[in-house]
Amino acid sequence: MTQSEAIWALGAMSGTSLDGVDAALVETDGETIFAFGNTDYRPYGEDEREVIRAALGRWPGEDGVQEAAEVVETAHAELLSRYEFELAELVGFHGQTLAHDPQGRGTHQAGDGAVMAEVLGLPVVWDFRSSDVQLGGQGAPLAPFFHFACARYIGAEGPIAFLNLGGVGNLTWVDPTKAKPEAEGALLAFDTGPANAPVNDLMRARRGACHDENGALAAEGEIDERVLSKFLDHPYFYRMPPKSLDRDAFAGLSAAVAELSDEDAAATLTAAAAAAVAAGVEHFPAPPAFLLVTGGGRHNATLMDLLAGQLPFPVRPVEAVGLDGDMLEAQAFAHLAVRVLRGLPTSCPATTGVAAAAGGGRISRPEA
Ligand SMILES: Nc1ncnc2c1ncn2[C@@H]1O[C@H](COP(=O)(O)OP(=O)(O)OP(=O)(O)O)[C@@H](O)[C@H]1O
Ligand SMILES: CC(=O)N[C@H]1[C@@H]2OC[C@@H](O2)[C@@H](O)[C@@H]1O[C@H](C)C(=O)O
C-alpha cells in the first residue's frame, strides 16, 4: 500500500466518562498511519449528560434510549460538520456505549450511523462492536489494532504497551515487529478495571465536580487498604485476558467507600484504578520497553505517581512519543473505519477473544 491509496478518515468517540465527543482526522490506509490531522472536542452540556446518564445500562427500545441517541447524534453532527474537518472522506462513528454485556444481551452503542451519513453527506462506519460479540468475542477493546499501527508510526522496535485511562481502563501490549496486528504474538489487550469513572461519580455526588482535578483530593487522603484488598479479590482480576467490562461492573467499589471521608474515598478509588492496572500487567507475555498512557487519567498526577511506583517499567504519557493522548480513541475509530471499508479485521483472539480474526462495523452511505 502506498500513501496515494490512503484517505483522510474522521473518527469520533464518545467515551464512558460521558464528558463529551472527541473527533480527529487521520490519513491512513487502515494499515499504515501516514499523518494525523485536525482534532476537536465538543463537551456535553449538563442537561445532555443527564439524558445519556439516565439511559446507561439500557438496551434499544427501552425508556430514554431514543432520547440519548438523539443527544449523541446532535452533538456529533455539530462537531463533525465543522470546517476544520472538511478533508474527511469517511467517518468512523463509535457512538456512546450505554450497555455492554458480551456474554449476555450484547453491546449497545447509542447513535445511528445511517442518520449521521445523511447529516454529514459522507459514508459512515459504525456499530463497530456487535459483530465481534455475535462471533463470541468481547466486542472490546478495539483500539489495539490502531495501537499496532501507532507503535510502528513512532518507530518502536520491540514490545511496548498502551494504557488508556478513561472511565474504564484498558491495556494493550503490542509487538510491532510482527507482520500484522492479527498475527500470533502481535497483541494482547483487555480492560483493566475501573479507572476514572468511580472517582468521577464520587466527585459528582460529594463535591458537585466532574472529576478530581489533577488528583488533588486523592493526594490529601489515606488509602483504605481493607477496601483496596477486597476490591482486588474480585474474580475479574484472576480471569485470563481477553476480557472487557461494563462501566458499572464494579458498582460495589463506590458503595465500599461510602463511609470514608471525601479525601480518603478519592485516595482509595484512585489507588484501586492503579492497582487494577498493576494486576493487569501481570498478564503481559513479556516486559514492554515502556508503557504509554493515554486518556484523561494521565492528567491525574496522583494516579500517574501510583502507577510509576507500582509498575516495573517506565510509565510515560503518550505525548512523550508525539501522540495526542486526548484524541487517541477518536483517531482509533478513524483508522478502524478504513479497515472496515477495506475488509480488514478489527479484532482477533488476543484482543477480544473472538475465535478468529474478524472484521466488524456497518457502512452507511448518504442516499443521493
Ligand atoms: N486534569 C485532570 N485531572 C484529573 N482527571 C482528569 C483531568 N482531565 C481529565 N481527567 C479524567 O479523565 C476523564 C476523561 O477521560 P477520557 O476522555 O479519556 O475518557 P473517555 O474517553 O470518556 O472514557 P473511555 O476511554 O473509558 O471510553 C475525565 O472524566 C476525568 O475523570
Ligand atoms: C464497550 C465499550 O465501549 N468499551 C470501551 C470502554 O472505554 C475504555 C474501555 O471500556 C474499552 O474497552 C472500550 O473503548 C476503547 C476505545 C476500545 O474499544 O478500545
Image (cartoon, grey):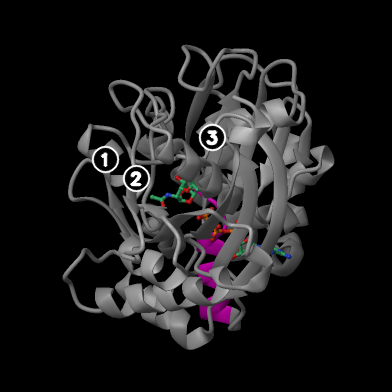
Q: Are marks 2 and 3 in contact (CB under 8 Å)?
A: no
Which residue does the numbered mark 2 point to in the structure image?
361
Q: Earlier in the sequence, mark 2 or mark 3?
A: 3
Q: What segment carries the magenta color?
A: 194-206
Marks 3 and 1, how far apart in space?
19 Å
How would you rate the neighbour count of disc 2 (Cα within 10 Å): few for under 14, some for 14-19, many for 20 or more?
Answer: many
Quadrant of image for the C terminus: bottom left
User: Label 1 amino acid?
Assistant: Ser
* Residue 264 visible, this angle: no
Specify the farthest residue to the front: 368
Marks 1 and 2, how far apart in space?
7 Å
Q: Nearer the viewer, mark 3 or mark 1?
A: 3
Ligand 2 closer than 8 Å to label 3 CB: no
Which residue does the numbered mark 1 point to in the structure image?
131
Residue sitting at 49 percent across and 30 percent down? 189
Image location of residue 343, percent across then percent down: 38, 32
Tell me: 293 left or right of 100: right
Q: Are marks 1 and 2 in contact (CB under 8 Å)?
A: yes
Which residue does the numbered mark 3 point to in the structure image?
30
Determine the main secondary structure of the stretch shown in magenta: helix
Q: Nearer the viewer, residue 156 or 218?
A: 156
